[in-house]
Amino acid sequence: MVYRVGKGLKILAFVFSCLALALVLDFVSMARQSTATSGQVGLYWFLAVFFIVFSLLLVLSIVRARVTIDDHSILVRGIFRTRSIGLRDIEGYRIIVGNRLLLVHKTGGRSLQMPSNLERQRELVQWVRARFDNLGGMEPWRERKAILANEAFGDTEDARWMSLKRAKSIASAGTVNAIALLLWEMVYPEPREWLMIVLLAAPWVAVYAIWYSKGLIRLASRKDSVYPSLILLLVLPVVGVLVAILRDYMVYQFAARGWVLVGTGGLITAAICIIACRKAIEKEKVLSFICILAISCAYSFGLIFITNCYYDRSVPAHWRVRVLSKRVSTDSKLHYLELSAWGRFGEGNSEEVSEVLYNGINTGDSVNIDVGQGKWKIPWYWIRK
């Protein structure tokens, strides 16, 4: 029996691919315009490449995905790999996130996750349910049993139980602090210098806690898992840093040197995280490594750009620029000034500014624009009255 992706999902994937390609053309067009604002050219190219890769992966996932069942095994083919499990090796199944079936290996080997949204999905589910036992909530019980039997978490069972309780407390505190830090950044980001230090340090606190727990705290875990997770303390502070950059800093020109620094920093950060958290990564290692690399590159971008601007001691170049018009976006209520030609913006550009500056400037007035060279030679600028 062979099960492929259903027609409905194929149509949906085709529509999404068309929309993604339309976005690519839009981003390329904006990147090639000389009026691209605040150094967003590099961001536009990044988004264009991202959506190209997204479209290709989406099409490949539809074309390659299938489940094949014969008299001896079940084979699941995905985008990058093919996995199988012998029928005799299956102890039973569990229903996980998204109503997906997880076939559990008898001897503790790697379980096999069945894709969803297949053609004749109901037939496949009925076949699995008729042949194998529903293990239901047995997985948390197995995890707890494995933890209490693992001497790495303590010399006695009581000590291991206390280690688990302590790990859960740490994970809960980390989650609460991660949310609090993001709210601090978005609601009242003062004092900025200390806030940036805390935001940039927080992910390393999570990495250290995961390393120190020897795998008891995970990067991410299932909703019903016994293992606690610190994924929010890894991600939300990085989001906060990126929000701060978009709100407070404007890139004049993000040269190739900047991307080299970001890429190098991202690879080094990812390598440190993977080594430190290797015991917390047991399943879906390839996906985990990709996610760590993505978060590390975002962190590297934030760290490099924040330090590039904050520690800039260069003498800024200065322009006096005329305000051609003003506008407030109808959806996000952001305030923009349309500026005349200056610097590399030969046809002028549109800049988002604070409400205070916006209200203090009239059409026809002039504003001051200063361009710093940056600590890492990534030019940036700021606008003042």
Image (spheres, rainbow, N blue to C red):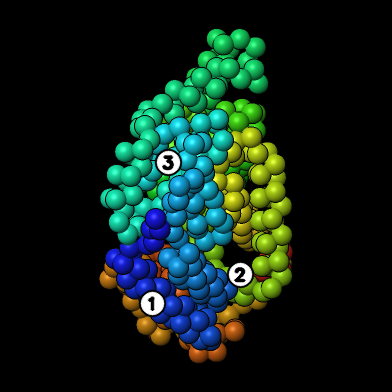
Q: Residue 288 location in percent, x, y?
A: 57, 48
Residue bearing mark 3: 102
Residue bearing mark 2: 380
Gap in angstroms between the C-alphas marked 2 and 3 = 50 Å
User: Which residue is nearer to you in this view: 141 or 265?
Assistant: 141
Sequence-wise first label, 1 or 3 = 1
Q: Residue furthest front?
A: 71
Amino acid type, mark 2: Trp
Amino acid type, mark 1: Cys
Gap in angstroms between the C-alphas marked 1 and 3 = 32 Å
Sequence-wise first label, 2 or 3 = 3
Q: Residue at x 49, y 45 (%)?
A: 72
Q: Residue at x 53, y 85 (%)?
A: 32
Residue bearing mark 1: 18
Q: Is residue 104 left or right of residue 100?
A: right
The answer to whether residue 206 shows anywhere in this view is no
- Badge 3 marks a residue whose secondary structure is strand
Q: Residue 56 location in percent, x, y?
A: 50, 71
Q: Is residue 14 above or below residue 135?
A: below
Tell me if mark 2 has few (under 14), some (14-19) or many (20+) residues whose alpha carbon lies within 10 angstroms of its own. Answer: many
Tell me if mark 3 has few (under 14), some (14-19) or many (20+) residues whose alpha carbon lies within 10 angstroms of its own. Answer: some
Q: Residue 4 location in percent, x, y?
A: 39, 61
Gap in angstroms between the C-alphas marked 2 and 1 = 35 Å
- Badge 2 marks a residue whose secondary structure is strand
Quadrant in the picture for the N terminus = bottom left
- For marks 2 and 1, give the one nearer the viewer: 1
Q: Residue at x 29, y 65 (%)?
A: 8
